[in-house]
Image (cartoon, helix red, strand yellow):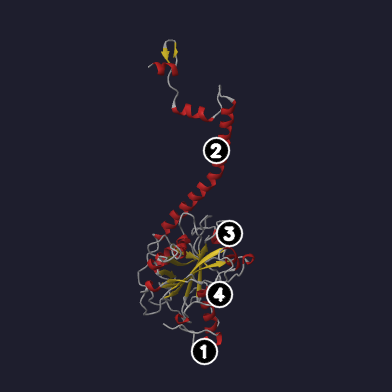
């Protein structure tokens, strides 16, 4: 009782009331009458630091809010698209009924992509360029997350699709849109000795429906690509949408597989339709925006099972990269030869191999 009375002295014979929590908090932060010089300096420094923190954190918090808002709006769209579940049944001459309501919202709708068990579950649009939908959502409103879009140079109609349909999507920090694709690459390096390759093993097949066809696609390659010449080679993996010949197709696939971090049991041949999914990724440095992740899949052929023997998948230990990676990541270790088993390229003949100086691998 004596200690209490000493701390809060009596006034007119009555002990003064203990200051409220908020008053004590304010007095602990803001310079107050009776504070010494060192206390005032400390409080001023704290206030400045707090202002700097709020000024820095507020935009980040707002960005996170916008990303979640974009995802919420997109999930409302996913409830609209209800396919009949019959995939790889052939192309229709008429637009599939499942797209009717989506087209009413956005006439530039060209498809729908989904990877079961992930957040990738979005409509696909195609604009007049590859810029508009980088920062506009499916409703045409400005959006930090943009929209999954097909390369405007690709062809998709009731008669045919481009042989290589390229889709772009942002890698959002909250794991939305094409962020999930990064798991294909990450789980190839989650263990030095024996990587799990778990994401590929759980998701070897992608669902991508166009306006005229429901289809599934088998993933056959996952690779990183440089987009700026100052860092080294730029391989234009998104620039090839159709192939002039069997040789042209084979050359493109071999280039993709030399740069693939994974080899799968999926074969491929001239005439197959290819699906390319592209997004940003930061595998080595967060301040470098020049790297892209690409996932390649081929459409399941008519009458073919969607089964994939994922246990045969393995990490490519000799991936073709670009100069910056060789200099700063690989300690100067460069790439010299193809490591992919070209027997998986069914349209690659012995004559092709002889011309290229390639020897088919033996079991």
Label 2 – label 1 distance at C-alpha:
71 Å
Please state the total of marks drawn on the protein image: 4
Q: Is residue 7 above or below residue 86?
A: above
Mark 3 or 1, nearer chain start: 3
Label 2 – label 4 distance at C-alpha:
52 Å
Q: Position of residue 241 (x, y in %)?
A: 54, 75
- Determine whether label 1 and label 4 are within 8 Å by CB: no
Mark 3 or 2, nearer chain start: 2
Q: Position of residue 37 (x, y in %)?
A: 60, 26
Label 3 – label 1 distance at C-alpha:
42 Å
Label 4 – label 3 distance at C-alpha:
25 Å
For disc 1, the marked residue is 351
Label drawn at residue 199: none
Residue at 39 percent of width and 75 percent of height: 88
For disc 4, the marked residue is 240
Locate residue 72: give its quadrant: bottom left
Which of 111/296 is in front? Answer: 296
Mark 2 or 4, nearer chain start: 2
> Of helix, strand and loop, which one carries label 1?
helix
Mark 4 or 3, nearer chain start: 4
Which of 33/54 is in front? Answer: 33
Q: Tag 3: Cα neighbours inside 10 Å, few (<14), some, or many (≥20)? A: few
User: Would residue 165 be visible to someone looking at this image?
Assistant: yes
Which of 97/90 is in front? Answer: 90
């Amino acid at each position: 009782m004596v200690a209490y009375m000493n701390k809060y002295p009596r006034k007119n014979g009555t002990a003064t009331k203990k200051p409220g929590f908020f008053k004590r908090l304010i007095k602990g932060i803001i310079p107050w009458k009776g504070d010494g010089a060192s206390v005032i300096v400390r409080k001023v420094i704290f206030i400045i630091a707090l202002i700097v923190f709020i000024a820095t954190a507020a935009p980040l918090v707002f960005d996170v809010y916008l990303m979640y808002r974009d995802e919420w709006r997109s999930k409302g769209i996913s409830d609209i698209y209800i396919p009949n579940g019959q995939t790889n049944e052939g192309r229709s001459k008429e637009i599939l009924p499942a797209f009717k309501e989506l087209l009413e919202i956005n006439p530039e709708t060209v498809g729908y992509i989904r990877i079961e068990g992930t957040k990738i579950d979005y409509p696909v649009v195609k604009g007049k360029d590859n810029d508009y939908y980088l920062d506009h959502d499916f409703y045409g409103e400005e959006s930090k997350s943009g929209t999954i879009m097909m390369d405007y140079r690709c062809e998709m109609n009731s008669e045919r699709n481009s042989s290589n349909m390229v889709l772009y999507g942002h890698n959002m920090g909250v794991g939305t849109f094409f962020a999930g694709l990064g798991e294909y690459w990450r789980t190839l390096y989650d263990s030095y000795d024996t990587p799990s390759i778990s994401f590929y093993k759980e998701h070897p097949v992608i669902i991508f429906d166009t306006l005229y066809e429901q289809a599934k696609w088998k993933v056959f390659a996952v690779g990183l690509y440089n987009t700026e010449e100052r860092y080294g080679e730029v391989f234009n993996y998104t620039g090839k949408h159709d192939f002039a010949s069997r040789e042209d197709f084979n050359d493109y696939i071999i280039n993709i597989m030399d740069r693939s971090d994974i080899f799968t049991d999926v074969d491929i041949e001239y005439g197959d339709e290819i699906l390319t999914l592209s997004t940003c990724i930061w595998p080595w440095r967060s301040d470098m925006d020049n790297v892209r992740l690409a996932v390649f899949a081929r459409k399941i052929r008519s009458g073919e099972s969607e089964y994939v023997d994922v246990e045969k998948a393995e990490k490519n230990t000799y991936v073709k990269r670009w100069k910056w990676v060789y200099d700063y990541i690989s300690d100067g270790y460069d790439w010299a030869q193809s490591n992919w088993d070209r027997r998986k390229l069914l349209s690659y003949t012995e004559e092709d191999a002889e011309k290229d100086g390639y020897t088919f691998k033996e079991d």
